[in-house]
Image (spheres, coloured by chain):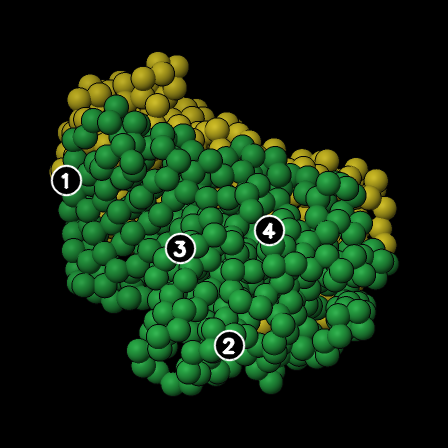
Chain colours: A yellow, B green
Amino acid sequence: MKIISGGVCAANGFKANGIHCGIRKNRTKRDLALIYSEKLCSTAAVYTTNLVKGAPLKVTKNHIENGYAQAVICNSGNANTCNANGIEIAELTCSLLSQKLGVKSHDIVVASTGVIGQPLDITPIKEGIPSLVDGLSYDGGEYAAEAIMTTDVLKKEIAVEFTVGGKTCKIGGIAKGSGMIHPNMATMLVFITTDCNISPKMLQKALSSDIQNTFNMISIDGDTSTNDMVTVLANGMAENKIIDSDGEDFNAFMKALNTVTVDLCRKIASDGEGATKLLECVVFGAKSKEVAKTVAKSVICSSLTKAAMFGADANWGRVLCAIGYSGAEVDVQKIDVYFKSSKGEIQVCKNGSGVDFSEEKAKEILLESEIDIIINLNDGEFTSTAWGCDLTYDYVKINGDYRT
Amino acid sequence: MKIISGGVCAANGFKANGIHCGIRKNRTKRDLALIYSEKLCSTAAVYTTNLVKGAPLKVTKNHIENGYAQAVICNSGNANTCNANGIEIAELTCSLLSQKLGVKSHDIVVASTGVIGQPLDITPIKEGIPSLVDGLSYDGGEYAAEAIMTTDVLKKEIAVEFTVGGKTCKIGGIAKGSGMIHPNMATMLVFITTDCNISPKMLQKALSSDIQNTFNMISIDGDTSTNDMVTVLANGMAENKIIDSDGEDFNAFMKALNTVTVDLCRKIASDGEGATKLLECVVFGAKSKEVAKTVAKSVICSSLTKAAMFGADANWGRVLCAIGYSGAEVDVQKIDVYFKSSKGEIQVCKNGSGVDFSEEKAKEILLESEIDIIINLNDGEFTSTAWGCDLTYDYVKINGDYRT
């Protein structure tokens, strides 16, 4: 397996585009994305567990119930959530696209991201669809990646090449992250495409399993979005023997998928709203997978730990505190904690108590932009990793006045 | 019942003091508090559920197991938590105080608040105890309230007068709040004193019941502290017939206690780290008490809602989002939301969708320093209130570099 350039257009048979249609006032910001496959795709998706769900998610769920889709349309700037006419607008978007693209409305995945509770005007979408479709190209993945961004600062895309049954396959994806991110069973918006030949059932199995250790282990701000969705479209154009059961081929696919999802997780976390640092919390020595995950996520979610990391302050007591209230069964007297970055590694806590360490060295380590918080529970064999970011002035600034 | 001036010295027979002994470098900040009762007191307490517990909590729990205490000593500037010699230092503090005060070491409640994981030096405490004890007075409540503050900006004290069995009783309290506040079964540091005559068992029953709807319904930052504790000392000097069972007298006591605790909750929330606004989330129309509490607390804890309130932005979609991920069973299509302050009230959401409202009026309402977020679930008869504060630049500033 190797990382290659590109995102959703890396796999054979996928085209994409992204344009400014006018949902956003800023004319330089693309706000409507399209991904299209030349062949009908096995399709899998996972959705937010928030009871308040964006209308597009409900429409998409209905559309891909049969396990197939051929295109994805997504707007930014408006979440189309908590609007009385939300379902109607999402369906209308699909039917307008269907007419121009020549793909059945029922084979279209629709998504929206942005402000909740403001009616979404269909006019700019309607007016934008012709040029959106006409501009589809094998190089358009980048435009799509841009068009789904909201407060994101960086485009998030990745692609890898891998082998299944002697055939070269490709898988790539794009993501929109930044704020309201604390996925539970699903996550922000992520669109993944592959030319691997895989059945809808096995594709869903791969995705549902993968997200437990990837997107569900990110948190930017503890707020589970209303519009989270991850979809994977697989068009089979790599012509490998179809993956329709567990085995070596499925494992190869899972590994490639995981490479894509972990990369997108790290990109989403490091581009959290206002973030200056990517935080990776690695827990090992846990007595169960559940304990490892609970501890890792609790530390990543702690506002006090996040603020300390912003200030490059080795305040490990906050890490212990977050472990203690996580709800996981741990033996506090066994816990060791380390901080690590490209500048080195330092132990700050042993057996649940502080150890003498150089504050100067700790500062040097914590001033870097990628920090590992390493926790050894010394209580078993299970491990887990969670991703987050620091809490900064800019998070407050961005969210103090998001709508204007 | 009426509110009277004072705090822990309002009730008969209680003296207090607070001095600077040298735990903190800032010489103008008092850092050692003492509360003393002329008579042995029925004593109740609740403690943090964090698995990482401050050493003083363990010592206190042991000391008041028999239901009685006569004095409280508390330092700020160091939490005496995650230190190998923590228990030893807490016991030593009690025994040094015992010698000077003439109260059994086992009848002393000990508490600490401040940085976690730095050994607590006994020297300044030892040197401070003589003047701490010599300075005890009936007017010293204010000094004690100051001495337990950490990043608190405002002193928090309250007292009320009430009648039990024809006798006038008084109850008053002080609190330390500000950061690492998301109590679960117990809370930050709160010391309450009363001259009401009540058995240890009924006092514990009153406290354990009250905190479910008061201190457990505050959140500043989602971080449950390691050192949370609420204690009530009742010396019986009001000479009412002892309250040793349920009934009218117990109810009168409960009501007075609740007046004190709700007041301290509001003071703690409005003085949250960096806070500019007190947020009160009032949920009604819930189908169970549990649903009402879960929804209220979820909204108060939402970083995005808190940041929007800082910016006086009527972004009610974030309130709906927080209700949706709270885990409570609600019917989204029935939810109404209102914002209210001294400048008026405005409805922003009806039946789960937005309503037209004046952004100008909403801004005027949200610019005030006390904001009510009112949620009607239209699904039953239960209500709940939670308290929190906005998320501001100063929260990040305070916590980006707390230790230095």
The answer for which chain carries disc 1 is: A
Q: Amino acid at mark 1?
A: Ala
Q: Secondary structure beneath disc 1? A: loop
Q: Is residue A222 above or below residue B132?
A: above
Residue B3 disc label = 3
Q: Is residue A255 visible?
A: no
Q: Position of residue B21 (x, y in %)?
A: 78, 52
Left or right of residue A156: residue B77 = right
Q: Give yes or no for contact between labels 3 and 1 (Cβ–Cβ under 8 Å).
A: no
Residue B326 disc label = none
Asked if badges 3 and 1 are on one and the same chain, I answer no
Question: Rounded to the nearest whole Å, what is the CA distance between mark 2 and mark 4?
Answer: 22 Å
Residue B142 disc label = 4
Q: Residue at x 61, y 76 (%)?
A: B39
- Please give the residue where the numbered disc 2 appears in the rendered image: B236
Q: Position of residue A111 (x, y in %)?
A: 29, 38
Asked if badges 3 and 4 are on one and the same chain, I answer yes
Q: Where is the C terminus of chain A found, in terms of image quarters? A: top left
Question: Rounded to the nearest whole Å, what is the CA distance between mark 3 and mark 1?
Answer: 48 Å
